Image: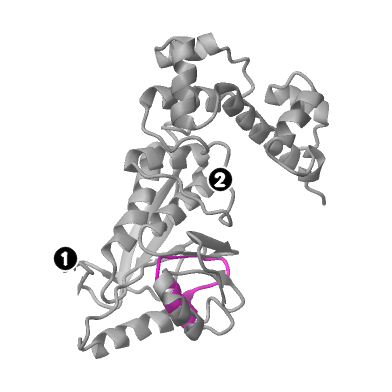
Amino acid sequence: MTGCSGRTPETVPVYVVLPPRAMLLDVAGPTEVLRRAGVEQDGLAFALNFVGPLPEMASSVGLVLSHIAPLPDRLPPDAIIMLSGNIDPLPGQDVRADNVQEQVIVDWLRRTVRPGHLLLCICSGSIIAARAGLMEGRACTTHHSSYDALRQASAAARVVENRLFVEDGNCWSSAGITAGIDLALHFVARRCGPGVAAAVARYLVVYMRRTGADPQLSPWLEGRNHLHPAIHRVQDAIANDPARDWSLTTLADIAHASPRHLSRLFREHAGMTVPDYVNRLRVGLARRMIENSRLDMEAVAERAGFGSTRQLRRAWGRLHDAPPSAARRTG
């Protein structure tokens, strides 16, 4: 667990909106990510509130969801709205009542969502959000079978295909079903840190997936798509102090393996060498300092664990096209 034990965590209210015929995995996957994130650190807690137009409804697999709270009249200014997708009706199925309940959600979204709220749309949940006018001018995505329906729901939406998830301001959307987990992990990395997201992914035994156009994976998450506990121990140690002068012998002791065996295991499971991994984290640390401080490059290089600015620039150049100075925020 990370964080300052003993302190009262900040609590963020999350309202999980359940439409008729809710896709169960759209609900369970992302909310389990948030629940586990609260276990892995003690600085932030997510208070899950399951709300909808009806107190009870059948999910996609027939499991009845009950004790669903009513859609609230108002939301806290820091609320997160997670909008689940739903399954298509069966041929010949009477969905008139379902359509009425979906419209109740659409009307509620129009009345209730404010600019400060964060909207997380899972799968076809983005279509309901689009019907409420929340995707106008926004880049968004949905299940690959529903691109046309999303365009029909909002002609002004910029529908992006072949993406696991899309982040546009305070409106985030994911592709089909399990991509909601990817979206939730990305959110946890943003709010709780990439190390927490990596720990949650390991617990759930899922990969931190990305397509070429998805937001870049944090260096703290790269090389973590494996299940080898010894390599994770080594990666955890490096991530906790990237600037330390890590020797292969020291890391081998952490892994309870010989240096040669560690080198082989690391390349096999992390997909890179130990020095490559250390340098990626040091570059990531340097980038944070460049973006968030006025330290000169010599000080950045030293604090990130590089022997010189030349070493920093050489390692940086292997990962980024632009020089380190381009990461400096202005204004």
On the rendered image, what quadrant is the N terminus found in? top left
Mark 1, residue position: 63
Mark in the foreground, 2 or 1: 2
As shown in the figure, which amino acid type bears the numbered disc 1? Leu
Q: Position of residue 304 (x, y in %)?
A: 69, 26
- Which structural element holds mark 2? loop
Of residues 88 and 144, the one nearer the viewer is 144
Q: Quadrant of residue 52?
A: bottom left
Is 274 one of the magenta-colored residues?
Answer: no
Can residue 161 be seen here? Answer: yes
Rendered location of residue 184, percent (x, y)? 43, 54
Q: Name the residue under label 2.
A: 217
**What kind of residue is marked 2?**
Leu
Q: x and y percent of residue 301 in the render? A: 75, 26
Compared to residue 211, the image places residue 312 above or below, namely: above
Which segment is the magenta one? 110-131
Q: Which mark is residue 27?
A: none
